[in-house]
Amino acid sequence: MSTHQHEEHEHHQHHDGHAHGHSHGHEHGHGGHGHHHHGAPQEGQGRTFALAVGLNVLIVVVQAIYGFLAHSTALLADAGHNLSDVLGLLLAWGAVWLGTRQPNARYTFGLGSSSILASLANAALLLFACGAIVLEAIQRLINPAPVAGFDVFIVATLGLIVNGFSAWLFMRGSKEDLNVRGAFLHMAADAAISAAVAVSGLIIMFTGASWLDPLMSLVVVSVIVYGTWGLGRDAMRLAMAAVPPSVDLSRIERYLTQLPGVRDVHDLHVWALSTTENALTVHLVMPQGHPGDAFVQDVVTTLRSGYSMHHATVQVEFGEACHACVLSERGRAH
């Protein structure tokens, strides 16, 4: 088969599944209408996000103002950290909302990949904020300024209460929805950081050890950088169509290779459509002929339920086509 024929076939295989010994099974994992939402928002989840975002914005404003007034870099760092929560919550909330958007003629996969771009932007913004806090903390360590320990204690305790309450709000949905679990863990970690800042405020209040404040801000920054680095790295990989970290490609390949009648597997590609959805394309060489639509549908269903491949495209071929066709397709596909 010539390359041209192969390309022609790629265009028309939906209409002629058995043409030239090829077949194409395509499944969006979207049920009857063609759109099923993974991690579909639970009842009231929007309200939970709105309340948590509102409370955290309030905390950011209060901590930023008192951080300046009390000369506390620890409070400013905690404000920065809580701002990261607001961004993270908005990202998770946006992912829930975008998950409800139907694909259209321009965005045939929907708008889920915007969550990858938002993750990248979130990470870049956080690292920039961390750099500013570290510079300030180093200057405070070199030239210590008196810190209002009582103010730091009160405001950080307020942060602890808000973050604890926010974590509690998300606890209910954290079992079923990975997106919500991320929000819950973020809030719980923040509650712990606010507690640490509150303790440093108490110690400063009783001992006057102002150097403890910039030191605590460096601890907070290191926690943010640790989390943000992972977020940024994963988002960058997803943006570059890498295999998502939760996917075991060799396991998928083993499953496909062991299917009855399959002699060879090639052009296996896996990439992320969003921070929660994955896609797969693969060619199965089956010399004995096309096994029927039911076989292809069964493979696609198994890939979705057992391997987190929400959009799977399977092409069956006899193995007669030259691999020049395969190579040309590989060049065009990605």
Image (cartoon, rainbow, N blue to C red):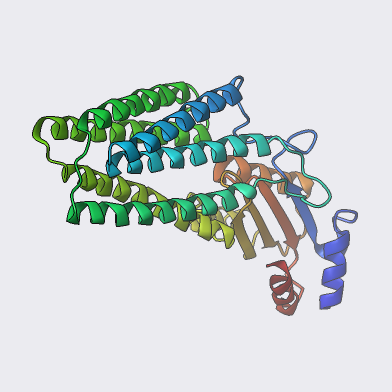
Relative to 42, is 54 on the left or the right?
left
Residue 52 seen in this snapshot: yes
Residue 2 at what x, y percent from top left?
83, 78
Residue 176 seen in this snapshot: no
Q: Is residue 294 above or below residue 258?
A: above
Residue 5 at what x, y percent from top left?
87, 73
Residue 80, quarter of the rendered image: top left
Residue 23 at what x, y percent from top left?
79, 57
Question: Which residue lies at the image location 59% right of the left edge and 20% below the top edge?
Answer: 44
Q: Nearer the viewer, residue 175 or 229?
A: 229
Q: Residue furthest left?
A: 207
Question: Which residue lies at the image location 48% right of the left edge and 52% below the top edge?
Answer: 125
Residue 63, quarter of the rendered image: top left
Q: Nearer the viewer, residue 73 or 180?
A: 73
State which quarter of the image contains the N terminus.
Answer: bottom right
Q: Nearer the viewer, residue 79 or 179?
A: 79
Question: Which residue lies at the image location 73% right of the left edge and 70% below the top edge?
Answer: 319
State which quarter of the image contains the C terminus.
Answer: bottom right
Count of numbered labels shown in the rendering: 0
Relative to 31, is 193 on the left or the right?
left
Q: Is residue 153 above or below residue 236?
A: above
Residue 162 at what x, y percent from top left?
39, 24
Question: Which residue lies at the image location 57% right of the left edge and 63% below the top edge?
Answer: 240
Q: Is residue 199 above or below residue 132?
A: above
